[in-house]
């Protein structure tokens, strides 16, 4: 037995443990992607068929102006409905579910005792769990982005797909920041329900600064939408590096707590 | 009973564990020699599970040291850790896995995993390989947990209340497996905590009594029983008070107006002689069993 095979064993266990989350996440993403394309087709049709005088009248209202813009620009529509909405919301929910199963639920079912009394170091156990969680998140949302692309192509809509996938990558990396934070919360609890509730409250706290222009940059969810790259055209490197740095800090903090915790 | 060797397999030194306001372990010093079986006994809340969880690394000690195979617990390599088998009071097996899947998962950590032994144990205990663990009974889960531990061919087997909830047949089978793999095997040691004192007496070379976080006594079962005897005497008239003040008397319990149970820890012959000199109706020696000792050391049943 070497470290590599033991680690592989730990990862396989996590994937088996979370298989229904993976299946549900992929199906939900696929369904939402298809729904987005269908919605665009029909809403776009409705907007396109509105008489000019009505469009002029509607242009007095902000919401109507935004809706008209949304359904007449597919690349913007894809970003706003996928990166800034579905991916962000679903990623937060799935992160909470994954981390609650991986830590708090294992603690409540006492399986963590079985897990940690295998001949592994706690650091290996924690690293395996987070690596598997990150890989699953990438698979679910990378898969979701691929379905979005495929559904768009089938429906005959085009966008800058390179830009879309890069934005999705940024979104997922920022999603991992949130997942790392929920993992720490889940380690602290021995019941998945309060762990999920506190993680949900944490999501709201992290979401709140994104609602105000001055504090936007403090919100993980603002960065998760990849708006600065996709809409404002800023280079993606700094934002991605910042997310990686935050993930590393949260990982180190989580590891320290996990190593010292009594189970 | 197994042959004792002088090498120490497990050594605890002044081991303490505090949980917020509660001191669960108050400084335990204990050794388990290689090739021997140590039984851990004590009422609920005595600190047995806490001690075992500390040894297994699930809890962090407040103070003291734990050495396994002569090495500090925290400095053990993965290869060394793989020589410890553990069966918890609650097995904590992954219920979403099948028996086969948990065996595959577990075997990946142990270089000395014995597939043949594992298969043999599974068929002997009639554990269905394709059954989901969530569908197994509590007893079957405990047995599966033992199969996982024994198939890893450990040098040290740690069992925390493994017999709890097992029917008598499963209890016998469980102990037989431990005896088969460990009794008389050079360099194989067992630490087992249990409330089933008769069964414990069958396999343990040494018994350690824990109460309220303290090690009350540790000795071989035979020595424990030989050290203390009880004289049951019914006098014909009230005996003189000096009789009960003789050195070596640990406890006197009055069972009737003139009937006494005198627990003697040493100086037995002289005390017995002194009792026999007074007119009496009955004078018996009552050999104490582990249950009596358990009651004494735990200050009565608290469980």
Image: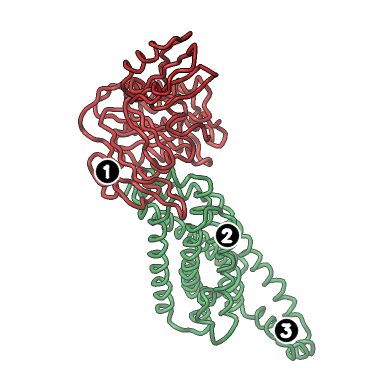
Chain colours: A green, B red
Of B93 and B207, nearer the camera is: B207
- Relative to B181, residue B67 above or below: below
Q: x and y percent of residue A210 in the render?
A: 57, 79
The residue under the point 52% across, 77% down is A219
Structural distance between the alpha carbons of marks 2 and 1: 39 Å
Q: Can residue A155 be seen in this view?
A: yes
- Classify 10 Å Cα crowding around label 2: few (below 14), some (14-19), many (20 and above): many
Q: Left of A61 or right of it: where is B203?
A: left
Indicate the position of residue B88 as horizontal and vertical percent values: 44, 37
Q: Position of residue B46 (x, y in %)?
A: 45, 39
Instruction: Residue A64: give its label.
Output: 3
Q: Earlier in the sequence, mark 3 or mark 2?
A: 3
Q: Which chain carries label 1?
A: B
Label 2: state its secondary structure. Answer: helix
Mark drawn on residue B67: 1
Q: In this view, does A5 lie above or below B263?
A: below
**Which residue is nearer to you in this view: A250 or A224?**
A250
- State left or right for residue A67 relative to residue A200: right
Labels 2 and 1 within one chain: no
Q: In which quarter of the image is residue B217?
A: top left
Residue A150 visible to the viewer: no
- 10 Å neighbourhood of mark 3: few (<14), some, or many (≥20)? some
Q: Is residue B259 above or below residue A66?
A: above
Q: Where is residue B18 in the image (x, y as percent from the top left)?
A: 41, 51
Q: Name the residue under label 2.
A: A196
Tell me where residue B257 sits by quadrant: top right
Residue drawn at x 31%, y 33% as measured from the top left: B154
Specify the subunit that label 3 lies on. Answer: A
Chain that bears disc 2: A
Marks 3 & 1, CB-CB < 8 Å contact = no
Which residue is at a point 43% across and 58% down the rendered structure image? A130
Q: Which of marks 3 and 1 is in front?
A: 1
């Amino acid at each position: 037995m070497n470290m590599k095979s033991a680690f592989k064993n730990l990862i396989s266990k996590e994937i088996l443990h979370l298989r229904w989350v993976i299946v549900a996440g992929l199906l939900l993403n696929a369904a939402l992607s298809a729904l987005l394309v269908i919605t665009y087709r029909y809403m776009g049709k409705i907007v396109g068929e509105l008489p000019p005088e009505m469009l002029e009248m509607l242009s007095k209202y902000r919401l109507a102006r935004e809706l008209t813009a949304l359904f007449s620009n597919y690349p913007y529509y894809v970003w706003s409905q996928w990166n800034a909405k579905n991916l962000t919301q679903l990623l937060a929910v799935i992160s909470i579910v994954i981390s609650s199963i991986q830590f708090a639920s294992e603690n409540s079912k006492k399986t963590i005792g079985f897990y940690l009394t295998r001949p592994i170091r706690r650091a290996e156990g924690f690293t395996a769990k987070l690596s598997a969680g990150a890989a699953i998140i990438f698979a679910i949302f990378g898969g979701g982005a691929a379905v979005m692309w495929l559904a768009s192509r089938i429906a005959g809509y085009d966008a800058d797909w390179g830009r879309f996938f890069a934005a999705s990558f940024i979104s997922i990396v920022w999603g991992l920041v949130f997942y790392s934070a929920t993992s720490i919360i889940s380690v602290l609890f021995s019941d998945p329900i309060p762990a999920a509730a506190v993680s949900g409250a944490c999501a709201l706290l992290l979401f709140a600064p994104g609602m105000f222009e001055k504090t936007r940059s403090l919100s993980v969810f603002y960065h998760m939408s990849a708006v600065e790259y996709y809409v404002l055209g800023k280079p993606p490197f700094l934002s991605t590096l910042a997310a990686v740095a935050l993930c590393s800090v949260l990982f180190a903090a989580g590891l320290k707590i996990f190593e010292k915790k009594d189970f | 009973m197994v042959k004792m060797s002088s090498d120490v397999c497990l050594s605890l030194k002044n081991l303490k564990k505090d949980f917020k306001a509660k001191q669960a372990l108050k400084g335990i010093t204990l050794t388990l020699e290689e090739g021997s079986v140590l039984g851990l006994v004590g009422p609920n809340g005595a600190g047995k599970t806490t001690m075992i969880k500390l040894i297994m690394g699930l809890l962090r000690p407040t103070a003291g040291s734990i050495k396994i195979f002569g090495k500090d617990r925290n400095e053990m390599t993965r290869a060394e850790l793989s020589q410890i088998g553990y069966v918890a009071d609650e097995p904590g097996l992954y219920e979403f896995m099948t028996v086969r899947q948990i065996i595959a998962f577990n075997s990946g950590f142990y270089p000395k995993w014995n597939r043949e032994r594992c298969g043999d144990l599974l068929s002997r205990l009639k554990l269905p390989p394709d059954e989901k663990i969530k569908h197994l009974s509590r007893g079957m889960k405990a047995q599966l947990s033992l199969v996982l531990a024994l198939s890893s061919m450990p040098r040290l087997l740690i069992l925390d209340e493994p017999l709890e909830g097992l029917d008598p047949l499963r209890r016998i089978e469980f102990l037989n497996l431990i005896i088969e793999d460990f009794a008389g095997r050079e360099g194989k040691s067992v630490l087992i905590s249990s409330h089933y004192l008769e069964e414990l007496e069958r396999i343990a070379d040494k018994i350690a009594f824990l109460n309220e976080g303290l090690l009350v006594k540790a000795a071989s079962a035979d020595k424990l029983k030989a050290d203390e005897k009880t004289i049951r005497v019914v006098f014909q008239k009230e005996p003189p008070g000096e009789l009960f003040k003789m050195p070596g008397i640990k406890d006197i319990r009055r069972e009737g107006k003139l009937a006494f149970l005198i627990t003697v820890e040493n100086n037995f012959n002289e005390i017995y002689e002194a009792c026999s000199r007074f007119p009496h109706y009955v004078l018996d020696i009552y050999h104490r069993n582990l249950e009596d000792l358990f009651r004494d050391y735990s200050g009565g049943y608290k469980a």
